[in-house]
Image (tube, coloured by chain):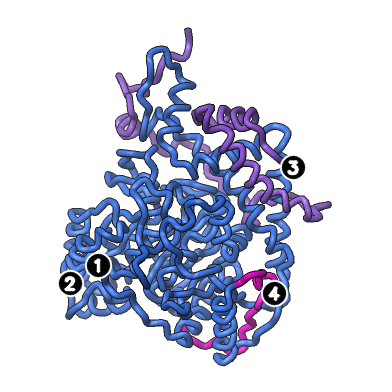
Chain colours: A blue, B purple
Amino acid sequence: MTDLTKLTIADARDALRKGDVTSAELTQACLTAIDAADALNAFVHKTPEVAKSQAEAADARLKADDTPDLCGIPLGIKDLFCTKGVPSQAASGILNGFKPEYESTVTTHLFDAGAVMLGKLNMDEFAMGSSNETSVYGDAVNPWKVDDRKLTPGGSSGGSASAVAADLCLGATGTDTGGSIRQPAAFTGITGIKPTYGRVSRWGIIAFASSLDQAGPMTKTVRDSAIMLRAMSGFDPKDSTSANIPVPDFEAALTGDIRGKVIGIPKEYSMDGMPAEIAKLWEDGTVMLRDAGAEIRDISLPHTKYALPAYYVIAPAEASSNLARYDGVRFGHRAKLDPGDGITEMYEKTRAEGFGAEVQRRVMVGTYVLSAGFYDAYYNRARKVRALIKRDFDQVFADGVDAILTPATPSAAFGLGEMADADPIKMYLNDVFTVTVNLAGLPGIAVPAGTDASGLPLGLQLIGRPWEEGDLLNVAYSLERAAGFVAKPDRWW
Amino acid sequence: MAIDTDTARRVAKLARIRVEDAALPALAQEFSAILGFIEQLNEVDVDGIEPMTSVTPQRLYRRDDVVTDGNQQAAILANAPDAREGFFAVPKVVE
């Protein structure tokens, strides 16, 4: 078997079970590909020793029947997940040297299922960014390229997207607070799903905005997302917002039959200045789903416009609280102190040195909107608007809509550094189509559906009913089959 | 709402992030731009709407009030920048 790293999770699973390939071989192929791809800066902490020993254990397990789907499958893990004894620093200088004494629930589930960890993946610092340019490790790079420029893989799960698109691993974990799985998936021509809030435990995932954060898989196909999501999901008593409901077999939901499903097309997502290519992609996707037998219905989500401003109150507010723990006392970086410095100077210098500019900006904006006299005007108002955004979705689902189709991003991947002089809000607009889903706690998936004029991948987003990831994945599967996106980046790294 | 440099200084202090005086005007300008963007929310009629406090309509999970772990002093101190004699060490906080 050649090109082992190009296998999907589903195909690798079948080959492993048949004995056509071993996990050791598959893992070694990925480790070799990773070592040859330093130019992408996707893997920032490589863990070949862990990988080899997990692969060996998986091969022993595979000799028995009834192994879990992920047994022996090599994966990349976003740096936001705490992995025992392995650096986990959310791409931040403030967690320099931090090696957790515990394992996140998601990675515990994955390892229990026999998955192999190849290493930790680059990301925006504390998942705050849409281009992977705020990382302490430097930019992750998109394997897609159309000219001399290096392009962003998107963010915050930029390393995950780059690694999966470049066939360095078979799948990767991501996290999504405002679009951080779906936007990078769209920028790199892969699939990524953010499940319903509460489906996947947040325990052991370094917190950004706790009411919005949710982990999910980033994979080469919709089927792989279904397989990996099932393994990541499940009730966890250690996460107070984890849902105590059964996890269905999402892969079994992939029938490809969407006849009679009602797909909503929200008029508010047709923004002023939308590039013609994005509008056309959206229209093409609509036609594909109609041809597959779905009923297309125009819908309205009237508060869409206010999602981004509400997000930029709520997410920084929660971040300012969550990131208060980085004080130089219990873990991570502590600034060198001058004679006479007390504890306040220690906090202030540590946080100024340890946090990058974007994280500092968001912590301070969050501090401001929560401060005395502004709490009602900003934070409570944003939470009310959030309730209205959720109500918009509740109403269309109550009217019989099964899923909603939108563009995933307002553009294809842009060049690294191109937004450096732009005002922060310009970067925030990357999440304009994805952020509503986090505010409403819904599942959302990005599926590659076409390319722009230069040949860069573009994605469409499907939004589903709460807890109906199986149905959502099935609609995505139908769209994936109709779109037939199979292009891969030419190897230049 | 425009943020002046005094407000920027106060916010940095509240957030426990040291910002040099020379950097305050640029910071104030960034805050003003972000808050200007946020102020669109004032257009929304929120009369009678309760602020969202829970993403999914469920009660927070409760468990029995019993000790579930402990005796992990070494693990807890393992990542500390400065740990001595079983404690986190910090600069003097009381005179």
In primary-sequence order, the first of circles 2 and 1 is 2
Q: Amino acid at mark 3?
A: Ala
Disc 4 chain ID: A
Q: Residues within 10 Å of mark 3 (few under 14, many from 20)?
A: some
Q: Secondary structure at mark 3?
A: helix
Residues at discs 4 and 3 in contact (Cβ within 8 Å): no
Visible residue check, residue A451: yes
Q: Residues within 10 Å of mark 1 (few under 14, many from 20)?
A: many
Query: Which region is colored magenta?
Result: A253-274
Measure the C-alpha gap from mark 4 to mark 3: 29 Å
Q: Is residue A9 above or below residue B59?
A: below
Q: Which residue is mark 3?
A: A377
Q: Which residue is mark 1?
A: A72
Provide residue A223's location: percent of width, then percent of height: 40, 77
Measure the C-alpha gap from mark 3 to mark 1: 52 Å
Provide residue A59's location: percent of width, then percent of height: 18, 67
Disc 2 chain ID: A
Residue A22's label in the rendered image is 2
- Residue in view at x 31 percent, y 60 percent: A76
Q: Amino acid at mark 2?
A: Thr
Measure the C-alpha gap from mark 1 to mark 4: 45 Å
- Residue in view at x 60 percent, y 87 percent: A294
Q: Amino acid at mark 1?
A: Gly
Where is residue A468, by image quadrant? bottom right
**Is residue A268 on the magenta stretch?**
yes
Report the residue that reaches farthest toward the right.
B47
